[in-house]
Amino acid sequence: MPSQLWPYITPGIPDELFENLPGIPLSQRELRLLLISQLRLKPDSVLWDIGAGTGTIPVEVGLLCPQGRVIAVERDGEVANLIKRNCDRFEVKNVEVIEGSAPECLHDIKVPPHRICIEGGRTIQEILQVIWRYLPPSGRVVATAANLESLYAISQSFSQLRARNIEVVQSSVNRLETRGFSQTFVAADPIFILSGEKLD
């Protein structure tokens, strides 16, 4: 469902339309599009977004799946409030923000997920082990890795959990930006996006 601030049915909200806080991660638009495509959402999907940061994924998915639900998990109270403000900016009503640390807070969530997005986290292996129990057969997990250690940890966890249909995509995005008197292509930080499904 489009909002007044973003009156389109396509995802890809410009980064500058989101309220943000210094030092809080914001998934850049192009990377967000890659991540959302890996989620393979349905109109009524329930998504758990663990480590939701600024709330860009909850907002985009909330708009894309008006019959679905998004549970945004964020451990920092100030950042959790930021997610709520961004949902209000875009008139998104189907996002619930849970303030707490994963995986400990996950047992408090009443709605089981169809899809789970994990955007970073030092305890990524522990989180993956726990969320796997909540995921139904054919449920899908998408996780991001910004460094070699996270890439290895997620790959190893997918192997241990016997995930199927594993896909790995590495982003390579350049944006045109004005620097002084000239326009220059500036690379966005590359990330790996890993996805896998639970066996029946």
Image (cartoon, rainbow, N blue to C red):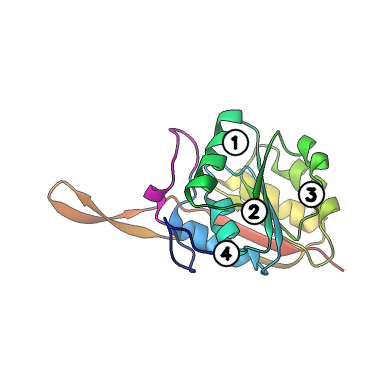
Vertically, is 55 above or below 137?
A: above
Q: Amino acid at mark 2?
A: Asn
SS state under label 2: loop
What residue is rendered at 43% in x and 33% in y?
A: 22
Judge the density around disc 3: few (<14), some (14-19), many (≥20) Cα neighbours within 10 Å: some
User: Which image quadrant for residue 135?
Assistant: bottom right
Q: Amino acid at mark 3?
A: Ile
Judge the density around disc 1: few (<14), some (14-19), many (≥20) Cα neighbours within 10 Å: many
What residue is rendered at 39% in x and 55% in y?
A: 14
- Residue 94 circle label: 2
* Front of the two marks 1 and 2: 2
Q: Position of residue 120 (x, y in %)?
A: 61, 44
Task: Looking at the image, tell me whether mark 2 or mark 4 is earlier in sequence order.
Answer: 4
Furthest residue to the top? 77
Q: Amino acid at mark 4?
A: Leu
Residue occupied by mark 4: 64
Magenta residue check for 15: yes
Q: CA distance from mark 2 to mark 3?
A: 21 Å
Q: Amino acid at mark 1?
A: Ala
What residue is rendered at 49% in x and 36% in y?
A: 24
- Residue 80 circle label: 1
